[in-house]
Image: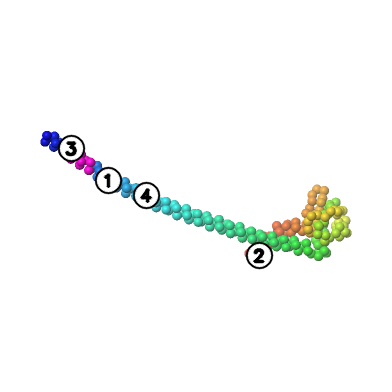
Amino acid sequence: MDGKEAIIAKIIESAEKKAQENVHAAEQYAVSVKEQATEWANAYSDAQEKVLQKEIADIVERRKIVAGLDVRKVLLKAKQDVIDEIFARAEQKLCKVDKKTYLKLVLAKIGEFADEGDEVVLSCDGVISEKDVSESAVFKEKKLTVCKKQGKFYGGVMLIGKTCDKNLTFHDIVSAEKDKAAPTIAKEIFG
């Protein structure tokens, strides 16, 4: 039995040695894989950190741009409100001029825009009367008539014609002037 036991002992010893070698190789492989995984994780983490920092910078830059645009919008709205107020006050002052100046302006506009046979609609403010308009030279020259019913507007007149109507109200006159003069006025006021 000694020979058998020696062979069995030799086989067991050889198997234990082979098992230890396999365990040692597996441990070395595990250490190597762990080192590689750690290196990859560190490299990936560094790369993601750079991407994240770039995204943060981009988000901050976009937010600054949007905030700048919002500020410009608010500023533009405030400037527009100031200009609107200027022209609203101009319209109010125009409606409050003395009767002579009021009539002169209305007759000048009628002379400029009226076609023969137009009907003049007076404003409801009652500053000028049918008689004031009908006694003018332009009224007679262009064979105009005055509407018996007043318009639902303040300041100026409207002309009702066969082919088209013309809005000569102070509101429309001021609005037309605003379209032309607003850029110049804004430049003078706001620089």
Q: Which residue is drawn at 27% across and 45% down?
A: 27
Type of amino acid at the residue the image marks with label 4: Ala
On whether residue 96 falls in the magenta region, the answer is no
Type of amino acid at the residue the image marks with label 1: Glu
* Residue 177 in picture, x, y percent from top left: 73, 59
Mark before the other along the chain sequence, 3 or 2: 3
Image depth: mark 3 or mark 1 in front: 3
User: Is 41 situated left or right of 88 in this image?
Assistant: left
Mark before the other along the chain sequence, 1 or 2: 1
Image depth: mark 3 or mark 4 in front: 3
The residue tagged with tag 3: helix, strand or loop?
helix
Q: Residue 11 carries which label?
A: 3
Q: Residue at x 29, y 45 (%)?
A: 29
Q: What stretch is highlighted in magenta?
A: 12-20
Task: Relative to 184, say whether 3 is above or below.
Answer: above
Badge 1 local density, few (<14 within 10 Å), some, or many (20+)?
A: few
Badge 2 local density, few (<14 within 10 Å), some, or many (20+)?
A: few
Q: Which mark is residue 41?
A: 4
On whether residue 16 falls in the magenta region, the answer is yes
Query: Which residue has dot 1 on it?
Result: 27
